[in-house]
Image (tube, coloured by chain):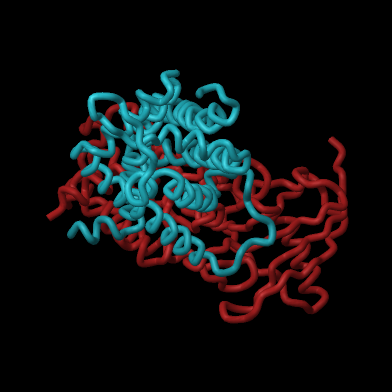
Chain colours: A red, B cyan
Amino acid sequence: MSQNTMNLKVKVWRQKNANAQGAFVTYDVAGISDEMSFLEMMDILNERLITEGGDPVAFDHDCREGICGMCSMYINGKPHGPWQANTTCQLHMRAFKDGETIVIEPWRANSFPIVKDLTVDRSAFDRIIQAGGYISVNTGNAVDGNSLPIEKQNADDAFAAAMCIGCGACVAACKNSSAMLFLSAKVSHLALLPQGAPERKSRVLNMVAQMDKEGFGSCTNTGACEATCPKEISIANIARLNNEYLGASLSAE
Amino acid sequence: MTFKQMFTSSVGKKLVMAFTGIFLVLFLVVHAGLNACIWAMDGGITFNKAAHFMGSFIVPRILEIGLFLGIFLHIIQGYMLTLENRSKRKIGYEVNYSKGSKWYSRSMAILGTILLMFFIIHWKHFWIPSRITGVAEMDLGNGFVVHNLYAVMQDTFQNVWVVLFYVISCIALAYHLAHGFQSAFKTIGVHNKRYHLMINSIGYGFAIIIPLAFAMMPISFYLHWVN
């Protein structure tokens, strides 16, 4: 298989720190193979910047195999770039054409403040999880996993919701900066399983309260989150969350 | 948890929009149904009788108070939510993400504003004359005198600009319903795939049929399909 190389322009958001004024800077990147991953292209740009004595572009990344949820670039007007059901690290340069200008922005939301360049602080998600994304487990010997019957459909739906890697693309894509797809995935995967039953009501109320405290917007069911989610979390989870919230808030003391 | 806490959370605010929205959807059915009496082809007798019933009977008058409360709650909450949601992203994107959602889903506030302007003009055309400033009357015999709202409609819809404005407003209503109908049910928690499909289908059907029926009313008068 022959490799094609391309020359690109990369228009990146540069911002020194959380309080600095940011701006776009355009770089030329030459000799990029279409077999490279997007982050490898960024590595090449950064190596050049370091060699030239400049400041490399800061961006989040970790596993580079699409499962950790760390990478977070908003590429050409879509979180994680043009491919469907895909993380930035799994995006390859064959998605772009020779001579193209690629615009790279950080996740934009007040609740995700910029740390530097393309790196944003997503600890708001951690605090939402801490507010209720857990289950009670008795101490003592571990029970046999097979002793607890779970309906197949519920197990499948719970697993599909548990696919959420907490990357924040849903917030970045949403015109309201709403974290509802993330929250609904976290609430759903526990609400659908018997292990999640003890805290079922307090969980949804506490997690919604924490989400509001973090300053995310309200969901208006536009569907942008579902369309951009690298793990294809269904927007039906948001309706399930609403159902959980309505039931829990009506029956709460 | 208090009811105040329940309805002022981000999910609760949407519940207010959904419940008032569904209530207004029901109102549209009643309004379209009653107005369809203009097509009885009897010079407006059926229509004026129906309008008289709605205006004089105690039950619809009480429901009318609920209707106004519902409309104002929907409008005020809608604007507040829009402003609040917009404030959540201080710095916008260079390239906006528009492929993942429908334009009308993202434009509910603009469509709603067109509808608000329509309501003000619509109230001025019909509701205010009927309730406050008075309209010409029609004698149906045996001393049964009713407001001749049919004649008011005939008169109002001779102006092509008024007809055009009503038709444009009906198109705005159609798109507002195309998103709002199904969104309201999702907000109140309908999540089963089976019901989703049903609600989406009914929602699109409703968004076509009801605004089309409304749009045909001024057109019918303007083109003298009814006399």
Q: Quadrant of residue B143?
A: top left
The residue that appears at 56% across and 71% down in the rendered structure is: A114
Q: Where B2 falls versus B190 (above or below)? A: below
Front-lying residue, A18 or A145: A18
Q: Which percent across, then down, holds residue B129?
A: 39, 47
Q: Is residue B15 visible?
A: no
How many marks the image carries: the answer is 0
Front-lying residue, A96 or A140: A96
Q: Quadrant of the N terminus of chain A?
A: top right
Q: Residue furthest top?
A: B41
Q: Is residue B207 visible?
A: yes
The residue that appears at 22% across and 60% down in the rendered structure is: B4
Q: Where B32 falls versus A239 (above or below)? A: above
A2 vs B183, left or right, is right
A35 vs A90, left or right, is right
B46 vs A98, left or right, is left
Q: Quadrant of the C terminus of chain A?
A: bottom left
Q: Residue furthest left?
A: A253
Q: Which percent across, then down, holds residue A137?
A: 21, 50
The residue that appears at 77% across and 64% down in the rendered structure is: A45
Front-lying residue, B96 or A112: B96
The residue that appears at 34% across and 39% down in the rendered structure is: B22
Q: Which percent across, then down, holds residue B40?
A: 41, 19
Q: Which percent across, then down, holds residue A175?
A: 54, 55
Q: Quadrant of residue B172?
A: top right
